[in-house]
Image (tube, rainbow, N blue to C red):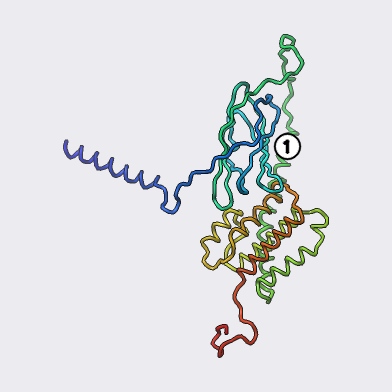
Amino acid sequence: MKKFVFFLLLSFLTSASLFAEDFALPEDSPEISPQVLSFSSFPKEVNLAQDFSAFVTLPERAQLDKYSYAQKDFEILSALPDESGLNVEIKAVPFALGISTFTALSFTGYDGKHFVTGPVTTEIKPVDTGVKEEKLLDIRAPYRPFNYWSLLWIIAAAAIIFALYVFYRKKRPADKARILKAFEEDKRPLDVIALDRLDHLLAGELWNEGRYKAFYINMIDILRDYIALRFAVDAHKYTSRDLIRVLKKTPAFKGDLKQLSDLQISADYVKFAKVEPTEAQRDADIRNMRNIIIDTRPPRLESGAKDGGNGKEA
């Protein structure tokens, strides 16, 4: 009996130790309390199934975290920043009557900082349709027989969409490989090639034609092509935030991460939030990109700058 009790006690201690190891926080990931923000504008009353807007001002540019969209009595339609990127308009629609709480929203900046809004209580009122309740009658939906032709068309459309998706997924990596190959075959230094491509982009017609999204996509592609070859990092597969994290751990990267973060945030707003950049914003982004390329360009020997043929700069 004593051996059996000892065996049970030993098993419990071993399981508890493994459980503690599995759920322990890593030493290099300390918990940081997020900064709490207040809505600059939030309606005290809203109508059922009618969208409304609330506004919050961020201390720095940040993106709304995906899990913040999970609200109990509301559906968040969009979270769009203005041109500064600091004033964010939250559009939502309520779908429950009575006093409800709009739960906290969480934002994450590109430098890893977190910001949260406090919960807000508001009253959701019914919509006045002008029809008296006693006049409402139950109705029955019309019977529709099953249509096999409709099902066939749906299956055919789904097959076409899937085929296009597979084709696009296969084609895009090939296009990236072709661009990088052309980049590598050019005998000029990497920074010279990247800056030359940037000059050609500025001299093109994308900006003058108002195709800002295409302009910023090409600009970021040039930068990521350069980073991929300069630091042996598969820059095209990372999100903007993940690329910052990778470069932080890359000893050879000596560029200004804040400049890179500002550039990518600005580009993401144009590409995903449909923000129309001003010429001043474009010039600032171009200046940041040039600085990143120049600050991280590979070392090279100038003509006649060798010290006795030993391969070191004079």
The quarter of the picture where residue 42 lies is: top right
The residue tagged 1 is: 152
Under circle 1, the secondary element is helix
- Check the image and report above or below for 258 versus 78: below
Residue in the foreground of this view, choosing between 101 and 60: 60
The image shows residue 159 at horizontal and vertical percentages of 70, 44
- In this rendering, does residue 67 appear at all? no
* Mark 1: few/some/many CA within 10 Å (<14, 14-19, 20+): few
Q: Is residue 146 left or right of residue 313?
A: right
> Which of the 4 image quadrants contains residue 205?
bottom right
Rendered residue at 42%/51% (across/down) = 26
Q: Residue 218's spot in the image, x, y percent?
A: 72, 59
At label 1, the amino acid type is: Leu
Residue visible at 65% across and 46% down?
Answer: 86
Q: Which one is in front, 2 or 126?
A: 126
Image quadrant occupied by the C terminus: bottom right
